């Protein structure tokens, strides 16, 4: 079992460190058979005619009350439009989301806050965020996505009660590093092909519960090397089933499927079962310590050498579209990290350490064809500071991300602006407008479309992401990249 955590001293709980030192188990020889079973069916949950019963019985024999839920796509825009959630959580317009949906704990009386059952009645009784007893565990058994640029699993605190305010509000902060594609590729059992593979994720604050769940899974026949743990740092959260307790969730991200049809099939499926494990008898937990974090950054600042080239590109853009029409927008760090949000009691919108978040100052966008936003910057994927990078336009009211444009779309777009600059291949130019001009690097923003668009003259901003620096397997550090930029051109 690989754990994104400090060492606990338990002989059966191993540490996944940034050195890539990973414990392996001979039982991994069972993996090819398990993979054959899994990939020959629509999803992990569909092959549980034997396995689900055996798994449930193994958990029960280990002393758990077992309740089941599922991992499923979460429609952030639909939830906002239905008045269920207060925003779209600054969603990534290039990447969909799945999350765990599970029932209440046995005997729970305090209400949870968020369910998509009003949109999907079959999910009645399942919650997208949920309270956890300190000795409970959430266990996800599923398959990883088909081939894509990125996928990950991460645990979150979602809602918190603030006594001084007398209210519950969202914090939505990550509780450590993710389990992502790039890290799984370091593991022998996954190697260079971590796609459509079985994976088990344990989300818990209690080392004893995690250990007992792991033993039960192995006894049920699962290879130990596919079991991973995301610890909950109990000192930073308020666990329990009371109204004043925090709520949590397990989020599954993915981006840029190589085969769109395969990606759509995965997103429209239920790729796994989520078990809520509640010990029959409560015992004081042996808590995980706060997980160690992979250090962002490599010290490599060569991307900053492109700053002068970016200035040259800016001048060319101004010459092309008209300096007198230009309104340069400033760029700043948008979101930091989960532990920052928890300490400052602010909503960090379900961020992840696998990326950096930048945003521009606010502007508006009318429907005049001569009114548009030119987005430009360094292609962080081309400089190897990220695996993929993208931008989108966000309304300030709903925080709804619209029209993602990524390095897949804008690579090579700067060369026509500065054709004699050999570094133009590392830069890009994109466009945000109301009209589509046919370029893959242009996004047309609709209006009169509820949260699927941004209204005329509604305050809005450009948001940027740069996911997973290859050398570190987490997001780059802000001080080693050149910030993306935007210029609004008025009629």
Image (spheres, rainbow, N blue to C red):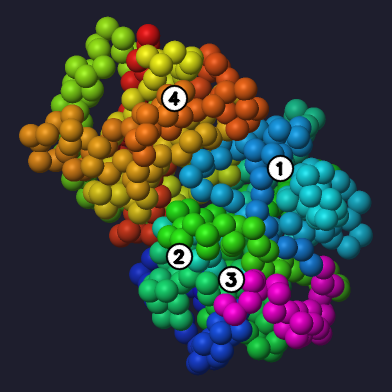
Marks 3 and 2, how far apart at CA: 12 Å
Q: Secondary structure at mark 2?
A: loop
Residue at 59% of width from left, 80% of height from top?
A: 40
Instruction: Look at discs 3 and 2 and give the one toward the viewer.
Output: 2
Q: Which residues are magenta?
A: 39-67
Mark 4 near mark 3, Cβ–Cβ under 8 Å?
A: no
Marks 4 and 3, how far apart at CA: 40 Å
Instruction: Look at discs 1 and 4 and give the one toward the viewer.
Output: 4
451 relative to 411 in the view: left or right: right
Mark 3 near mark 2, Cβ–Cβ under 8 Å?
A: no
Residue at 46% of width from left, 81% of height from top?
A: 189
Q: Which residue is mark 2?
A: 147
Q: Secondary structure at mark 1?
A: strand
Up the image or down, 479 lies above or below 315; here it is below
Mark 1 or mark 4: whose residue is earlier in sequence: 1
Q: Which residue is mark 1?
A: 159
Q: Is residue 48 magenta?
A: yes
Q: Residues within 10 Å of mark 1 (few under 14, many from 20)?
A: many
Marks 1 and 4, how far apart at CA: 39 Å
Depth check, front residue: 54 or 456: 456
Q: Which residue is mark 4?
A: 435
Depth check, front residue: 63 or 323: 323
Instruction: Look at discs 2 and 4 and give the one toward the viewer.
Output: 4
- Quadrant of the image occupied by residue 56: bottom right
Asked if residue 136 can be seen in this view, the reply is no
- The overriding secondary structure of the stretch rendered in magenta is helix
99 relative to 309 in the view: left or right: right
Q: Where residue 416 sits: x, y (%)? A: 18, 33
């Amino acid at each position: 079992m690989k754990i994104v955590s400090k060492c606990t001293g338990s002989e059966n709980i191993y540490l996944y460190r940034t050195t890539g030192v990973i414990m392996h188990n001979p039982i991994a020889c069972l993996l090819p058979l398990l993979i054959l079973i899994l990939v020959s069916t629509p999803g992990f949950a569909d092959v549980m005619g034997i396995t689900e019963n055996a798994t449930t019985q193994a958990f029960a024999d280990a002393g758990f009350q077992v309740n089941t839920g599922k991992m499923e796509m979460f429609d952030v825009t639909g939830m906002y439009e239905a008045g269920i959630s207060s925003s779209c959580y600054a969603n990534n317009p290039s990447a969909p989301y799945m999350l765990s949906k599970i029932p209440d704990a046995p005997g729970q009386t305090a209400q949870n806050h968020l369910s998509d059952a009003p949109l999907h009645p079959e999910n009645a009784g399942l919650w997208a965020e949920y309270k956890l007893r300190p000795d409970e565990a959430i266990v996800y058994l599923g398959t990883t996505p088909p081939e894509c640029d990125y996928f990950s699993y991460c645990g979150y605190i979602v809602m918190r009660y603030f006594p001084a305010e007398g209210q519950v509000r969202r914090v939505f902060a990550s509780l450590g590093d993710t389990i992502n594609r790039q890290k799984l590729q370091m593991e022998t059992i996954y190697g260079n092909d971590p796609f459509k593979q079985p994976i088990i994720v344990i989300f818990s604050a209690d080392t004893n519960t995690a250990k007992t769940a792991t033993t039960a899974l192995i006894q049920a026949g699962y290879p130990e090397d596919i079991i991973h743990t995301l610890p909950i740092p109990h000192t930073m959260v308020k666990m329990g089933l009371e109204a004043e307790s925090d709520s949590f969730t397990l989020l599954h991200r993915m981006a840029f499927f190589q085969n769109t049809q395969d990606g759509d099939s995965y997103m429209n499926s239920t790729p796994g079962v989520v078990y809520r494990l509640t010990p029959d008898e409560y015992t004081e937990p042996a808590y995980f310590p706060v997980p160690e974090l992979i250090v962002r950054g490599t010290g490599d600042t060569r991307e900053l050498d492109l700053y002068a080239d970016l200035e040259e590109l800016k001048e060319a853009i101004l010459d092309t579209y008209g300096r007198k029409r230009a309104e340069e927008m400033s760029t700043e760090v948008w979101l930091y990290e989960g532990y920052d949000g928890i300490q400052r009691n602010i909503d960090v919108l379900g961020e992840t350490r696998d990326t950096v978040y930048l945003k521009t100052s606010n502007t508006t966008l009318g429907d005049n064809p001569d009114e548009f936003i030119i987005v430009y910057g360094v292609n962080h994927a081309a400089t190897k500071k990220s695996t993929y990078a993208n931008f989108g336009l966000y309304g300030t009211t709903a925080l709804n991300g619209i029209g993602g444009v990524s390095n897949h779309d804008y690579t090579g777009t700067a060369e026509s602006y500065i054709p004699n600059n050999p570094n133009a291949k590392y830069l890009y130019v994109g466009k945000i407008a109301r009209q589509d001009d046919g370029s893959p690097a242009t996004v047309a923003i609709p209006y009169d479309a509820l949260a699927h668009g941004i209204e005329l003259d509604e305050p809005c901003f450009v948001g940027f992401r740069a996911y997973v620096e290859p050398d570190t397997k987490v997001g780059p550090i802000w001080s080693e990249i050149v910030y993306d930029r935007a210029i609004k051109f008025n009629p």
